[in-house]
Image: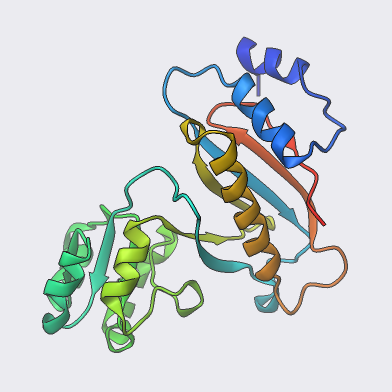
Amino acid sequence: MKRSKSIQNAYDKIDRLKQYPLSEAIKLMQELSTVKFDPTAEVHFSLGIDPRHADQQVRSTISLPHGIGKSVRVVAFCSDDKVKAAKSAGAVDAGGGTLIDKILTKGWTDFDVAVATPEMMKELAKAARVLGPKGLMPNPKAGTVTMDIEKTVKELVAGRLEFRNDKTGIVHTVFGKLSFGDKKLLENLEAMIKAVKEAKPTGSKGNYINNVTINSTMGAGIKIELPA
């Protein structure tokens, strides 16, 4: 794939073999950004796992110290008596059978995260063929199947983030906006690294994190040196 001139110029200023200390990498990422909007700060973890095995899956959630810089659309699958609390907490919609039918009949998936109470999961399974491929199916490991719908919705709306590995064993996620500034980006990145380390699956043997790269939206990738 041919790189744009701006991306190529950015890569010319990076030592491709060097792993930069976190603070240095963040400054470099900001300096190399050329877009006219407020770009997202992205981080990519290449992991020493085999995603074909169930005991080598990485999936967890984190509430970053300074959020992610964007509003999160949350939908809650719950009984009627919890609908008001879920919506007051910030859910864009909440409910049970009617909401599930909306997904099944209209293919509605205009949200970023779904949460559900345990008793709703059996009924929600009917919508798994729609929600599953989009990564929107609630999951206990991600903390999105819960009895405390109100608290979970509040945390997600405030920026609680779910991350998971893809089929190649890489975790792609974000840690804020460039407008956050050095200090907040550094604290968010440190928290994200810690969370990925803590999410190491039981089946992972040998080297768990092979390398980590950060970049801004449409920006050059910068390898980082993991803190001890």
Name the image quarter holding the C terminus: bottom right
Can you see residue 27?
Answer: yes
* Colouring scheme applied when the structure was drawn: rainbow
Residue 32 position, x and y percent, is 63, 20
Q: Residue at x 22, y 57 (%)?
A: 108
Q: Is residue 98 left or right of residue 53?
A: left
Q: Is residue 184 left or right of residue 126?
A: right
The image quadrant that residue 25 belongs to is top right
Is 38 or 2 nearer to us in this picture? 38
Can you see residue 4?
Answer: no
Say how many tags the image has: 0
Is 5 or 19 nearer to us in this picture? 19
Residue 157 position, x and y percent, is 32, 58
Residue 49 position, x and y percent, is 75, 65
Q: Residue most toward the front?
A: 183
Q: Residue at x 31, y 73 (%)?
A: 151
Tell me: residue 48, above or below residue 16: below
Tell me: residue 106, above or below residue 81: above
The image quadrant that residue 203 belongs to is bottom right
Name the image quarter holding the N terminus: top right
Residue 208 position, x and y percent, is 79, 63
Q: Is residue 88 left or right of residue 26?
A: left
Q: Residue at x 63, y 67 (%)?
A: 58
Q: Residue most toward the bottom?
A: 119
The image quadrant that residue 43 belongs to is top right
Q: Is residue 23 left or right of residue 121?
A: right
